[in-house]
Amino acid sequence: MLEKVLKGSPKYYMWLAFLGGIIGVGVITYLFQLKYGLGLTGMNRDVTWGFYIAQFTYLVGIAASAVMLVLPAYFHGYKHFKKIIIFGEFMAIGAVVMCMLFIVVDMGMPQRMLNVMLHPTPNSVMFYDMLVLIGYLCLNAIIGWKTLECERFQVAYPNWVKYLIYTSVIWAFSIHTVTAFLSQGLPGRHYWLTAILAARFLASAFCAGPALLLLLLMVVKKLAKFEIGKEAIKTLTIIITYAMCINVFFFLCEVFTAFYSNIPGHMHPLHYLFAGTEQGLPWVTYWMWIGAIFAIASLALLIPTSLRENMKILPWALGMLVLATWIDKGLGLIVGGFAPSPFETWATYAPTVPELLISLGIFGVGAFIVSILWKIAIDVKKEAGTL
Amino acid sequence: MKRSRRQFLKVASLSVAGLGAQLAAGGMTKAAAAVKPSYKEDALALKAKRWAMVIDTREFASKEDFDACINACNHAHNIPNIPGKSEIKWIWKDAYEHTFTETKNKYQSKEIEDREYFMLCNHCENPPCVRVCPTQATYKLENGIVAMDYHRCIGCRFCMAGCPFGARSFNFTDPRPYIKDINPKFPTRMIGVVEKCNFCVERLDEGKLPACVEAAPGKIHFGDLSDPESEVRKLLEENYTLRRKPALGTEPGVFYII
Amino acid sequence: MYNSKYVISGLVIFLAVFSYPFWGNLASKDYNGPKLSLPADQKQCIEPVEFMRAEHMTLLNQWRDSALRDGKRVYVASNGATWEASLQKTCMSCHTNKAEFCDTCHLENAVEPYCWTCHVPPKGNE
């Protein structure tokens, strides 16, 4: 099936070359970071995680969200998802690879990365994070590849794949739970020290991931000329809508607990994110308000069935939803977590240009992987007549 | 063709096996030649079940009082003087409201409010940094000291997110150019690793008190918290002391006489 | 076999190039280790020379773990002598000439240990 990667239209090659260029810029910038250290980023003594770890967190969610297709299709035998399930699995592969790269570029001593395996430490959540990410990557690669191959030869997939699929369902929940546990078990980081963080992560992942998938599919179906299926879109948007409602509800629970209890430590991060400090509004405040408005607007467009099923409106609703969840998790979460420093001073952070270029390079890698995997899937499915 | 391929495989597998055996045998002779290492503690080493520090904050008034300790530490451990937000500090001073964030009081005694306070790693009994470190580069010694192995640190900074006291620093840049007078008895650190106060474990092991304690005789006390007869325990009995963020349950080992 | 002419001649050329290090050095002189400058006032290292040459890095790793993790900073050598387990305070106090001792051999063997990005070599050397 790999040969499908090599046969494509000029447009396809131009797209890959464009991504290659972005990746190249990222790699060169990263070489500078390796030489001159993480001082090239906006991180500092008080804000020790930044854009990289935030993207890692967001993308684990995107990876986990494949389960929103797998679960209905394989657990409940929902047939309409069968056609697009492979796209979810392949997107998860790209997302997991990006997660791993974001962790690597965030390390001060990436040369020593394997120390995590040489000195396995079961009391560290990061140890489990490594395990679940590698496991999830393998699961999706094996399942995706095998099921696609069987589809190509028009045979039923072997029984052992089914057990892997069931494992991957539980695994998807575990990767994002473990990611939340990285933050939510730390004493003294009030914004994260909340039992609902893992649940919030899952809710935001299960709306953002399928929304992103659907948006990408809408683009690709125009390029490759196929139909996603009305029923599939209908069901997936309902899933997205419910998950987003739960996501917003969980966030409001946080707001209530912080402000009704009136405990300063709990109020500080939210205050910083949405109302700034005595010294003025940090850059993130504008983003947070955009995120809040987009979250509400997306729900307003998704909840009424007539609007949700309008294919003209849907992409806008999904776009706003993806952006809102990204601002919440890919910006606000880390900035808010570190803003009140351990000394109760305001610690500021903003990503620098090199940091953003490296991040862009990693997104390029993810897009590259998803592009070639989807290319394979589309070509194979077209040949087999299952698209 | 088929036959010769099989022969080739046979020969190849035999030679691989032979090579493997040779390597294994070589490895064994090597191991036999190695000297059995034996290590012991320095006879002068200071020992305790739980090292702890009591800082008499009443004794620190002038800038010189603080600088004596800070400079002693900085020199002993080759701590760079990096300006700005990526600074490295093992022991430093700050205002009351930044040190004791949980016991702030708008109408505090002016004298206490105006005083400055040392901050350093608390060498907690339940250190979150040790809990989260994925490589055991940070670990707790039997004597209660939370130590670090800079050779093993991967620079993930999970420990910095975990520490509620802001006691850890990260080498965002190469520290060497920022060290004026390098102490040849102690290593520096390199780009990309985390570092922090080590309660001068290297000095205790050769029978010396920590550098800051030595630099402030009678002002900073150091001893065994588990020994009821120790000086630190007596001071704790006789004086009202605070610890930073006791509510988090990390059980800090640094006490402040107010 | 198809194209046996090309395949066999290709294999021969490949083998010739691949084995060059072996036959290429047959004619050359015997290999002599690099000349290291040894401490003038000392006859013996803490362990036999052969052991130190082959295993000094392992020994240093053991020193590190023993000193940092077990608090045992005294090394009892095979001849019973005791030494402080410290690269800077013990090794480099005799081997004061990093450039002509450590670096010469490491360079010859194409290894680049990064000990000295943290550990401080004696001053007279820089």
Image (cartoon, grey):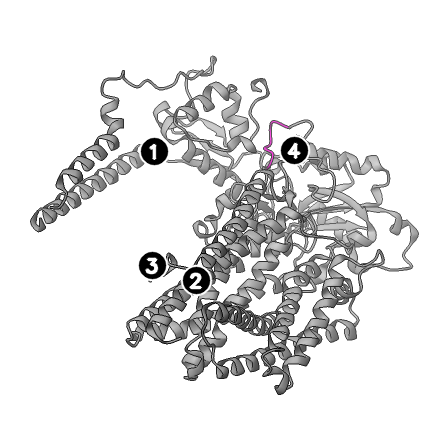
Residue to which mark 4 is pinned: B78
Crowd tier of the residue under label 3, counting other residues whose Cα lies within 10 Å: few below 14, some 14–19, many 20 or above? few
- What's the distance in space between the residues labelled 2 and 1, CA to CA? 43 Å
Query: What label sits on residue C7 in the rendered view?
Result: none
The magenta span reads B183-189
Query: What label sits on residue B34 in the rendered view?
Result: 1
> Which residue is most to the left?
B3
> Which residue is most to the front?
A10
**Which amino acid type is marked by label 4?**
Asn
Query: What label sits on residue A137 in the rendered view?
Result: 2
Label 4 residue SS: loop
Marks 2 and 4: in contact by CB < 8 Å? no
Chain under numbered label 1: B
Marks 3 and 2: in contact by CB < 8 Å? no
- Residue B141 in sight here: no
**Residue C47 relative to residue A233: left or right:** left
- What's the distance in space between the residues labelled 3 and 1, CA to CA? 54 Å
Residue to which mark 3 is pinned: A3
**Discs 2 and 1 carry the same chain letter:** no
Q: Position of residue A135 (x, y in %)?
A: 42, 63
Q: Nearer the viewer, mark 4 or mark 2?
A: 2
Label 1 residue SS: loop
